[in-house]
Amino acid sequence: MTSSKHILIIEDEEDIRELVRYNLEREKFKISEAESGEVGLESAVRELPDLILLDLMLPGKDGMQICRELKQAGVTRDIPVVMMTARGEESDIVAGLELGAEDYVVKPFSPKVLVARVKTVLRRKLVTPPTSSDDVLKIYDLCIHPGRHEVTVKEKPISLTASEFGVLHFLARRPGWVFTRYQIVDAVHGEDYPVTERSVDVQIVGLRKKMGKAGEYIETVRGIGYRFKDTE
């Protein structure tokens, strides 16, 4: 991991910001800080950091709203977001992933674990396939472009979160193959990613809804998991 990566910390509690900053600076990361979501949004657009550490319980706009706005804006959409929060309920984890967060760390957390998670997310970003016409996957009336992170259905674009895009691309590359929920999580997010089986189900529901009639291409295999409809 190179030492020049820029991390933006959006956290209203000063002691937590100092703890996180200290441990990341020890690893030679460049650090910016914001005490509120609104200031954090402005900093993200202005500085375009390599990764954002985002507290969920912020005054004013909370972390969920900030994450939503980051992922909806073209200039910040592809910046990885790692949420930091005292909440640990499954519903919060699912909500964060649905909005496009790449990881989720529950307070109180080990600084070493946080640093490791940050490095893992940044490594994952580095191995993103380069943009190329060869990357385009056309199946049925879908066109999936990994390099551009674009999906169209009957030539009409649909907006997907990073997780939804990863799930769709993974399944569509292997039509007819059945995958368990954990296989899908490992393929899209990497091993040891902190999600539950229900979070995959929620992502599939969201995908089908956004895809409209084309959502029927993602089939449920009861008792096992999911598959993309076979082309044969």
Image (cartoon, rainbow, N blue to C red):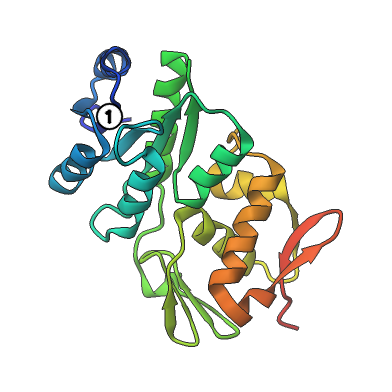
Residue 108 higher or lower than 155, as above or below = above
- Seen at 60% across and 32% down, the residue is 89
In which quadrant is the N terminus drawn? top left
- Rendering quarter of residue 195: top right
One can see residue 197 in this view: yes
Hey, which residue is sitting farthest right in the picture? 223
Pick the residue in front: 125 or 196: 196
Give left or right: position of 209 versus 154.
Answer: right
Q: Position of residue 131 (x, y in %)?
A: 34, 65
Where is mark 1, residue-wise?
9
Element class at badge 1: strand
Front residue of 75 and 94: 94
Amino acid carrying label 1: it is Ile
Q: Residue at x 27, y 38 (%)?
A: 37
Residue 64 in the image: state x and y as whole percent. Answer: 41, 43
Above or below: residue 202 compared with residue 92: below
Instruction: Locate residue 125, reporting x and y percent.
Output: 38, 45
Disc 1: CA contacts within 10 A as few (<14), some (14-19) or many (>=20): many
Which residue shows up at 47% across the image and 14% down it?
110
Image: 136 above or below 178: below
Q: Is residue 173 visible?
A: no
- 89 on left or right of 86: right
Give the quadrant of the C terminus.
bottom right
Q: Nearer the viewer, residue 94 or 141?
A: 94
Name of the residue lying farthest toward the front:
60
